[in-house]
Image: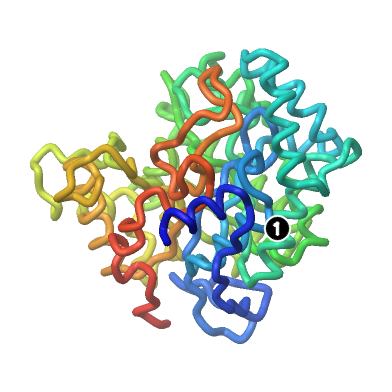
Amino acid sequence: MAVLHHFLAVLGLLTPLIRAVVPPPLPLHSSSRWILDADNNRVKLRCVNWAGHMETNVPEGLQHQSIDFIVDWIAAQNFTCVRLTYSTDHALNPDLPVAASFAAAARDAGVPAADMTALYSRVVARNPWITPATTTRDVYAAAVDKLFARGVLTLLDNHVSKASWCCHINDGNGWWDAGAWYNPWNSRHFDTQKWLDGLQAMAAWSLSHPGVVAVGLRNEIREFLLQGTLNGRADWYTYVKRAGDLVHATNPDVLVVVGGTQSTTDLLHIRDGGRMLDTSGWEGKHVWEMHAYSFTVTFPDVFDNCDVVKTQYGAFSGFVLEQGKAYTGPMMLSEFGVGMEGGEAQYQGLSAKDDKYLKCLVSYMQNNDADWAVWAIQGSYYVRDKKVDIDETWGLMNHDWSDWRNPAFPGMLGDMWKMTQQP
């Protein structure tokens, strides 16, 4: 039976069993450390990341499954939202036909044009609604609207400026080019004005797509060399405020999601630096975010002690959940994840390192009952590392996007699925 199930899914002939999900009354807002709906009831965001920020400028996976199959699968797994990533390139070029985007991706990603043409043909075969006139923004609209029709909300995340994989210290997407101590390795693609223009464009677009309930200002801001270190992170305060004000002025309904520096791990400056970010321009819409992986340098496990690691989580970012402070706000763990296969049987396919990391992180999250978004749904990418249809061993779904890569993984999250605390 399992073999038949997989075969039908590969052929696109099997639709996941969809759980009835009713979206909360919108718009959402924040109060103290909580995200609330329009009736002031708590909403817990249980999300999955879905990448769309790479060279093709559309959400991944359509070469393997129809977009309906993918959104049905997401809804069936009890996720309440998707963190949908995009590039500034896409934000400012919404009318680019999908076919042209795949053709350009061959050049940008360094693969043969014929390979991308063949990949595009597979996308259209699985998704015949995509025609020569279909734009990359049309695909985003389909994803957002189809998710919302199934009760699943969307957080739009500005992942990078130049459409490409994230992140490397020299990828040019890490810090504002208008900031102090510019260097090309970290900032050559991060055009500050284009970033602001892109955020405004996506916020304006979201006005006609009610499934978009939140906008992440920028993924994994990170200093390199002298950036941010000698001026108290003044650039972060300046540009994050400017962006948050702009997004809220454009679409007052969406939550504004803000991460710290050091790749969305470090908010120490708003506490120990004694200067809170001015969020008055989006009052009642503010949400913090944090990332944590087993390899995250901000949270090293040098003492082989989970309690020490959890203390680091709280010390660098999680402290914003403490109520009654100027910096208090919801904190979303918007990226975490593990390699899903190749490990030992005693760890249900995970490596020993990832198993230890995940158990510790789950314990921290269960104790705080915070919102989260796991990295990531994609079982493969259109193109990455100069390879087409490359496997993603960290993907929740398998290579052909037919089902879980590691069926034991949902259970590993324990009570993170539940809402255990209330305002």
Q: Categorize mark 1 by other alpha carbons within 10 Å: few (<14), some (14-19), many (20+).
A: many
Q: Is residue 273 visible?
A: no
Residue at the image point whose x is 63% and y is 52% from the top: 12
Q: Indicate the quadrant where residue 9 lies.
A: bottom right
Q: Indicate the quadrant where residue 126 lies.
A: top right
Task: For mark 1, give the secondary structure.
Answer: helix
Q: Nearer the viewer, residue 247 or 232?
A: 247
Residue at the image point whose x is 67% and y is 20% from the top: 115
Q: Position of residue 189 (x, y in %)?
A: 63, 22
As shown in the figure, which amino acid type bears the numbered disc 1?
Answer: Val
Q: Position of residue 169 (x, y in %)?
A: 44, 22
Q: Is residue 150 left or right of residue 2?
A: right
Q: Nearer the viewer, residue 12 or 255?
A: 12
Q: Position of residue 304 (x, y in %)?
A: 9, 43
The N terminus: image quadrant: bottom left
Q: Indicate the quadrant where residue 211 lies.
A: bottom right
